[in-house]
Amino acid sequence: MKTGLLFPGQGSQQVGMGRTLAERFPVARETFAEADDVVGFALSRLAWEGPEELLTATENAQVALYVHSLATYRVVQARLGTIVAAAGHSLGELSAHAAARTFSFADGLRAVRRRGELMARAGRTVPGTMAAVLGLGGAQISELCREAEDSDFTLVAANLNADGQVVFSGDVWGINWIARAAKKKGARRVMPLKVSAAFHSPLMRPAAAEFGIALEEVRFRRPEFPVVSNVTARAVDDPGEIRRLLVRQLTSPVRWIDCIATLRRMGVTGFVELGPGKVLTGLNRRNAWGIPTRALGTPESIDSMEDWT
């Protein structure tokens, strides 16, 4: 199998994430213990026991996802066949780079913690939110963005997840407007998301500026396997460019459809989603039809891998 690694982003977190994995596999338990030491609090307890409202907070959800994804990767790494490349959705891009050893696990964890703190603070400073819109094509999405700009709303297509599924991000007024305007364009459904800020939009500029400063303290290396950028939808191996793109990512759309297309062109014959949930596996039913995708993050899912290679 020529494997493409997929790492989920914020929204996939859930109370209990990683607990059975750590109980079954020593390397997963050690990963969570290392994370507790790095962040200086019982992150493992928060991930395993909650409470949900605290785990869902941006500054906590991102580090919990990063740790669970890397713990899963360490458990299954030797069973993945040939790793062609990786991609991660938003926060997951940092998980992908940690797996590729672009930076150390600890440095990446500290960067993710700072990223979450900055994004949460930006949301408190300039209120914003996000909404998923189903059933619109590219032309209709572009029309909505132009109409929002004409009305002086801050509104962008932030996550291009799959054909017919886009997440808009912007100020509260823009998201309230899109809920009505999208249905007039023929959207099947508009779903407000439970997020604390307008991620991947211009409202994240203050967070991006400070995140850039934080990343200057991180030692970047050339990844051991290609990692596809959310911003450009192409694999990047220059450490300086990777750093710059991770900063740009906070204010740029997540081009997930194009990221998966790039991985397919690179020769991937099977995908694995590493972490809690199956969000990216579900999207691959449209983005990578005909290519198997497995969601790994529990002992049961890992036990089913016998035929993977």
Image (spheres, rainbow, N blue to C red):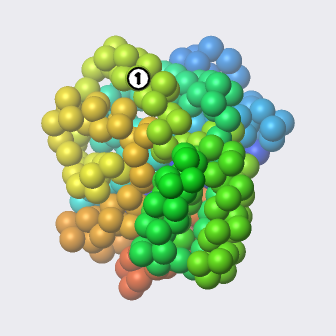
Where does the image place residue 110, in percent across and percent down from the top left? 48, 21
Residue lying farthest to the front in this orientation: 150
Q: Is residue 113 left or right of residue 231?
A: right
Where does the image place residue 252, in percent across and percent down from the top left? 40, 46
Q: How many marks?
A: 1
Residue lying farthest to the bottom in this orientation: 290
Q: Is residue 287 left or right of residue 218?
A: right
User: In this view of the protein, which residue sits in the foreground, 177 or 188?
Assistant: 177
Q: Residue at x 57, y 48 (%)?
A: 153
Give the quarter of the image for residue 271: bottom left
Where does the image place residue 192, in percent across and percent down from the top left? 72, 58
Where does the image place residue 288, in percent across and percent down from the top left? 39, 77
Residue lying farthest to the right in this orientation: 51
Q: Is residue 180 above or below residue 193?
A: below
Q: Residue at x 26, y 65 (%)?
A: 262
Task: Residue under label 1, please give it.
Answer: 209
User: In this view of the protein, which residue sits in the foreground, 228 or 245?
Assistant: 245
Quadrant (top left, top right, bottom left, bottom right) of the N terminus: bottom left
Q: Residue at x 28, y 56 (%)?
A: 233
Q: Residues within 10 Å of mark 1 (few under 14, many from 20)?
A: some
Q: Is residue 37 visible?
A: yes
Q: Is residue 123 above or below residue 288?
A: above
